Amino acid sequence: MPNAESVSTAQSPRIIVFVDYWNFQLSINEIEARANGSRSPRHSFSNRLAQTGTLSSGTRLRTSHPATGKFHVRWNEYLRVVQSSNARESQIQELGNGLARSSAGHPSRLPRAQAKGLAALSCLSQGYYSLPA
Amino acid sequence: MEKGVDTLIATDMIRLAWEQAYDVAVLATLDSDLVPAVQFLAAKGLKVIQAGFPPKGIDLATACWGSIDIGRSRDTIRRAASN
């Protein structure tokens, strides 16, 4: 295993984002249910779990449907986006676009704009744009 | 249906680290099953930042180099969503 210290982290570290949509959406639902004083909607995932969608660009985890041979995106897919650009705004935009593409056609997932906001928030959050030596 | 996603993420995190494909990983999940993978990467000097809703997922957040509290920035997300 290469030592990470040998990897350049000088000005613009390469950032990779792993999003477990299933886990994340579950948590969001629980938090919103608690805020609204309603029952946890955890059980409501039984319907959503059956949902599949056609392959969209930007997705990584995919399964081949045994009957049709077409690729289907699973509900529990996650997205990874590797960034190496030096342009901060460009990084945010590309991250957001990647997340949005991943959620396209899946209304029960994080809304496109919300996913974009999440990506932007992640990029803007302090801690990894100013890595200590 | 979500079975195995934690393993897939852990495998990708370690594989891509091996390939020196990233410097920092942002891990948006609360799944504590990923703690061993994060600890392994930390031992190798890689930085993993958890994005979540504390105190949920505190085990994973503690294992990570840093964490992002998305819950504290919900308004930011909602503003982005309205654009």
Image: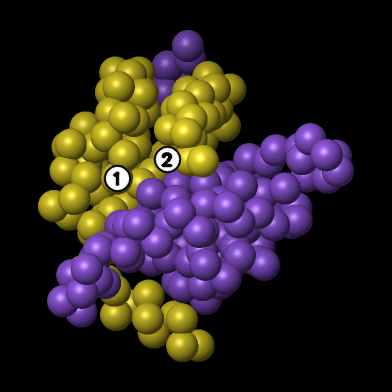
Chain colours: A purple, B yellow
Mark 1 residue element: loop
Residue B52 position, x and y percent, is: 28, 54
* Quadrant (top left, top right, bottom left, bottom right) of the C terminus of chain A: top left
Amino acid type for the residue under numbered disc 1: Leu
Marks 1 & 2 on one chain:
yes
Examine the rendered structure and indicate whether residue B18 appears above or below residue A25. above
Give how far apart the Cα atoms at labels 1 and 2 are: 15 Å
Residue B56 position, x and y percent, is: 18, 50
Examine the rendered structure and indicate whether residue A86 appears above or below residue A111. above
Quarter of the rendering containing residue B60:
top left
Examine the rendered structure and indicate whether residue A60 appears above or below residue A53. above
Q: Residues within 10 Å of mark 2 (few under 14, many from 20)?
A: many
- Which residue occupies 42% across, 65% down? A118
Q: Say which mark, if any, is on residue B25.
A: 2
Which of the two residues, B54 or A38, is positioned nearer the viewer here?
A38
- Which residue occupies 50% across, 24% down? B11
- Which residue occupies 31% across, 39% down? B31
Among the two numbered marks 1 and 2 on one chain, the one whose residue lies closer to the N terminus: 2
Chain letter behind tag 2? B
Q: Say which mark, if any, is on residue A133.
A: none
Mark 2 residue element: strand
Examine the rendered structure and indicate whether residue A105 appears above or below residue A78. below
Mark in front: 1 vs 2:
1
Decide if residue A125 is in sight here: no
Residue A114 position, x and y percent, is: 46, 73
Q: Residues within 10 Å of mark 1 (few under 14, many from 20)?
A: many
Left or right position of A42 against A38: right
Left or right position of A12 against B52: right
Q: Say which mark, if any, is on residue B30.
A: 1
